[in-house]
Amino acid sequence: MDMKRILFTLLVLLPLISCKKDDPAIEPEKDLAFVSIEAFQTKTQIGTNAVPIWSMDDKIAVFGDGSDSPSEFTLRSGAGYTTASFEGVKPAGENFIVYHPSTAKCDGITFRGILETQLSHSAPSQLLGMLPLWGRARELENVRVSSPCGILQLNLKGKGKLKSIVLDAGKPISGEFLCSLADSLFAMIGGANIILMDVPETELFTSETTPFYFVLPPGEYEDLRLTFTPAEGEVLYYTLEDIITVKAGLFSALDINLNDLL
């Protein structure tokens, strides 16, 4: 078994595209990220300009066709940037599958992971959560990884501070998922219909939008409901009147003015 330690860096290339609910569908680019032998990257935080950046605790995994288990790579440098260096022990094999987060599971046929039911929001960088990414590689050179999930960018206007946001999709959106590596078929395995985002002391403004990000399974959402709990005052409710489509690797935007819900 080749136990050579290697260092590589990943550049995330999530497109800066927001698709509003009534806009024509925009086809995603084929790949979300570029990886070379000295380049590697995954999810993590997303800045206010919708550019994913790395966090100190980011880790990815590499599964080789000559090994029984994946090798974990840890971030060496690049926290707070769109590019970062990861270091780990190269697994045996000639063909590899690289994926994020490292806690996900990959057997060469399927990719399994978890979409969190409860998230936390912190400004000025919004926690994107554990955005799943995976891709194939030979000799860990020129690897491209993509996400089977999409991102709902919730743009809010209002006045005052929020305490929490609950997104109820009417179908499973958090919990365990399964993605086929052959045809990218995505399925939730049970799971919950909701995602709770804690947004302590996050202030909204009437003159500008504040973005919040939810990682969601791809598909059409027609029963989407949102519950907004302010730091002070009555709980507010929003029900989507139209269908919004979330596509793998794309941001889909939903604009809401909480003053209209009073």
Image: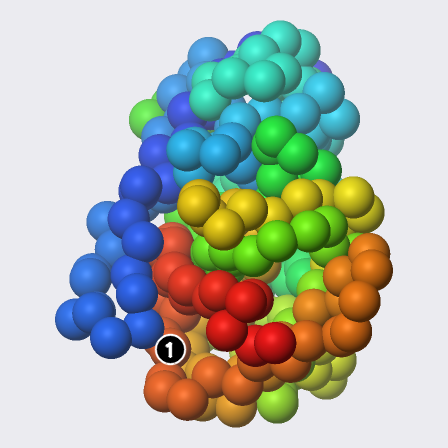
Instruction: Indicate the position of residue 218 as horizontal and vertical percent values.
Output: 44, 71
Q: Residue furthest left?
A: 24
Is residue 244 something one can see in this rendering? yes
Rendered view: 164 above or below 82: below
Instruction: Indicate the position of residue 182 as horizontal and vertical percent values.
Output: 40, 66
Quick check: 3 left or right of 41?
A: right
Q: In which quarter of the view is residue 55 placed? A: top right
Q: In which quarter of the view is residue 235 placed? A: bottom right
Q: Nearer the viewer, residue 250 or 126?
A: 126
Q: Secondary structure at mark 1?
A: strand
Quick check: 16 left or right of 191?
A: left
- Which residue is denoted by mark 1 in the rendering? 244
Q: Nearer the viewer, residue 184 or 161?
A: 161
Rendered view: 4 above or below 115: above
Q: What residue lies at 31% left-to-right and 73% top-to-bottom? A: 21
Q: Which quadrant is the C terminus positioned in?
A: bottom right
Q: What residue lies at 47% left-to-right and 84% top-to-bottom? A: 240
Q: Nearer the viewer, residue 122 or 140?
A: 122
Quick check: 207 left or right of 201?
A: left
* Amino acid of disc 1: Ile
